[in-house]
Amino acid sequence: MLNLRYGAAAFVLLAACNQGGVASTGNVSDNSAQASAPAGERPFTVANVATLDSPWAMTFLPDGRMLITQKGGQMLLGSADGQQRIEIAGVPAVDSAGQGALKDVALHPGFAQNGLVYFSYSEAGQGGKGAVLARGRLVEADGQARLEQVSTLYRATPYVEGNGHYSAQIAFAPDGQHVFFGLGDRQKFDPAQDKGGTLGKIVRLTLDGQPAPGNPLAAQGFRPEVWSYGHRNILGMAFDASGNFWQQEMGPKAGDELNIVLPGRNYGYPIVSDGDHYDGRDIPDHSTRPDLEAPKVSWPGTAISPAGLMIYSGKLWPQWRGDIFIGALSGQALVRVDVDGTNATKGDQWDMETRIRDVAEAPDGSIWLLEDGGRGAGGKLMKLSPTG
Ligand SMILES: [Ca+2]
Ligand SMILES: [Ca+2]
């Protein structure tokens, strides 16, 4: 079933945007274009830093520079101000049809010493298409950058037909010894509950991509890498400073949710959801099945279509320390969730007047957004700074 928020119109526009195929590497800046919400509504100003080609995800290097992925398969290395960008060579070819893309990017916990970059993408293979976790070493010389020793660490199981709900989100455990990989249901529903595969699951792997010892569900007949299940389309994952593992997923119609991921738990899809199927069929709400993990926050009635998840340090906006920031695609917003320990409540939802694909924090505490490339927008890099 097609997720209506990624309907045919968006597909055509994305395909058109990607036909150029060449990453923007020039100095593209439009700092004069401040977003137009009335003054006083938002405690930040917005600078449009650069035009991009359907960006998907971003992360910052320790020195303040950034890595940005683009849907068509480019990984960019950007200067700390975002205005200079070069394309990194050595990235494998991706299948970018539909929701396919070069997807997430994250740094190995020892990146400062070893230069290792983890990234994910969708590819075609035996049986259809699936999500891949890969790793390479970032090497720079003579103003150029490339990934060396690129290896595939892990693939979702099984590969299936279709171009949706890959998820492919990456998060490192606070211990620095494990990597979590979030895998979507591929719009196939029931596999999220199936013990035999990894669709609709979060897996916990060693840093080399093997099933981590001690995972919680192997004794129940799941694959040894599975950490949690019953997920739909995971589009953001991060650990907070206390070690809580937060995750958001795009639900069925008006069923978007924010969860804390606990080992071995079932997050309910497609048995329960606070939303319902796009074709109008009811899905019982989470409250009907207290044995399944309920979301900490859900958005029944008004979908936000979450994309990206960042937990804020408080460096520039101390009042937001520990809060969760999520982009909204159909909601065209930046969402702030108030976090108090393991409790979460809706905070702000600032209208950004465009689809937000990812949100990240720079080492200096500034907040950066990626405008999605779908639905007529080309995609851009935006920086938020405090007002006053
Ligand atoms: Ca759920
Ligand atoms: Ca429901």
Image (cartoon, grey):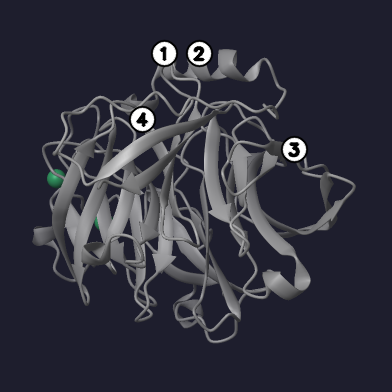
Mark 4: few, some, or many residues within 10 Å (few <14, many ≥20)? many
Left or right position of 300 against 104: left
Farthest-out residue, bottom = 214
User: Does residue 268 appear anywhere in the picture?
Assistant: no
User: Does residue 330 appear anywhere in the picture?
Assistant: yes
Mark 2: few, some, or many residues within 10 Å (few <14, many ≥20)? some
Q: Earlier along the polypeptide chain: callout 2 or callout 3?
A: 2
Badge 2 vs badge 3, beta-carbon distance below 8 Å: no
Name the secondary structure under disc 2: helix
Amino acid under label 2?
Val
What residue is shown with label 4? 355
Farthest-out residue, front = 388
Closer to the camera: disc 2 or disc 3? 3
What residue is shown with label 1? 9
Name the secondary structure under disc 3: strand
Q: Residue at x 62, y 20 (%)?
A: 18
In the picture, the quarter occupied by the N terminus is top left
Q: Quadrant of residue 344?
A: bottom left
Question: Separation of disc 1 and disc 4 at Cα?
Answer: 15 Å
Residue 74 x/y as whole percent: 69, 36
What residue is shown with label 3? 87
Q: Earlier along the polypeptide chain: callout 2 or callout 4?
A: 2
Mark 1: few, some, or many residues within 10 Å (few <14, many ≥20)? few
Q: Residue at x 34, y 76 (%)?
A: 244
